[in-house]
Image (tube, rainbow, N blue to C red):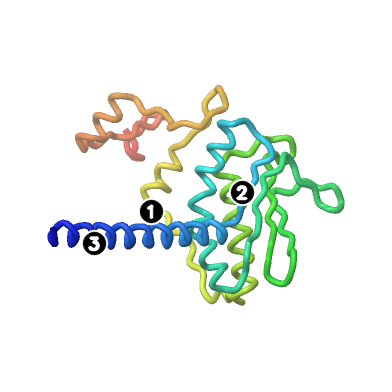
Amino acid sequence: MLSTSGDLLIMVLVAMVAATMAVAVSHLVSLRRSRIPRLRLLTGTHSQQAAIMLAVRPVVRELLPALEAAGLEVSSIALLPTLAGSAGEPLQAQVEQVNGSAFVIRLAHMVGGILRRPEEVAGALAGELLGLYRDAAAVKIVRQTPAATPERILVAAENVAVRKNGHSGVSPQSRAAAKDEAEGKIIQFKDPLGSTNGQGA
């Protein structure tokens, strides 16, 4: 009988520890959710909203901790059909300071009558969050390095021509010329006036 009551005691202790851990995890999850701003999608179809959520989540996940560390809080992010400035000009984003360190960010789904792609909306949000961080943390850019362009890309860009339909493409090369170039053959230049390689006949 002692072994049965000992087993019962162990079972009760395990159940209490599991219940305590479940309560602790739920509190941590609710605390984490309360720190993440609520994203309000007030426009767009269901599929558009899903694509925007997919594009915006990584931006929020990566940039909000830095803002919180700088002492700022983004209480809400809203996607609206359009945004306009005080003079009526179209805006892609708008940041409103609610109180000393809390902000509301509004994003436009359409700018100038053109529907923006999800990655454009996420890029606008990232730009606004980075701007808030730079202002709050007094970030000073001390050096900028331009992107290096490999020579291959430059050479390939020189060969790009505009086709008749208006699209760009690579200028065509004849098969014989491509074969000669690949085999390393030297092609003599023939002058229309009769000289070869710049010399008289």
Q: Which is nearer the N-term, disc 1 or disc 2?
A: 2
Give the quadrant of residue 200.
top left
Mark 1, residue position: 150
Within 10 Å of disc 3 (Cα), the crowding (few <14, some 14-19, many 20+) is few
Mark 3, residue position: 9
Residue 66 x %, y %: 52, 68
The answer to whether residue 44 is left or right of residue 88 is: left
* Element assignment for label 1: loop
Name the residue type under label 2. Answer: Leu
Please tell me which residue is depicted at 56% across the width and 41% down the height of the picture. Answer: 52
Which is in the foreground here, disc 3 or disc 1?
Answer: 3
The answer to whether residue 12 is left or right of residue 68 is: left
State the separation of the CA atoms marked 1 and 2.
41 Å
Mark 2, residue position: 39
Q: Using the image as rendered, state which of residue 52 and residue 153 is in the foreground.
A: 52
Name the residue type under label 1. Answer: Pro
| Rendered view: 92 above or below 113 | below
The quarter of the rendered structure image containing the N terminus is: bottom left
Name the residue type under label 3. Answer: Leu
* Element assignment for label 3: helix
Within 10 Å of disc 2 (Cα), the crowding (few <14, some 14-19, many 20+) is some
User: Of the numbered discs in the image, which one, if any, rests on residue 137?
Assistant: none
The answer to whether residue 201 is left or right of residue 85 is: left
Within 10 Å of disc 1 (Cα), the crowding (few <14, some 14-19, many 20+) is few
Q: Using the image as rendered, state which of residue 70 and residue 76 is in the foreground.
A: 76
Residue 196 x %, y %: 32, 34
Which is in the foreground here, disc 3 or disc 2?
Answer: 3
State the separation of the CA atoms marked 3 and 2.
47 Å
Q: Which is nearer the N-term, disc 3 or disc 1?
A: 3
State the separation of the CA atoms marked 3 and 1.
72 Å
| Rendered view: 121 above or below 135 | above
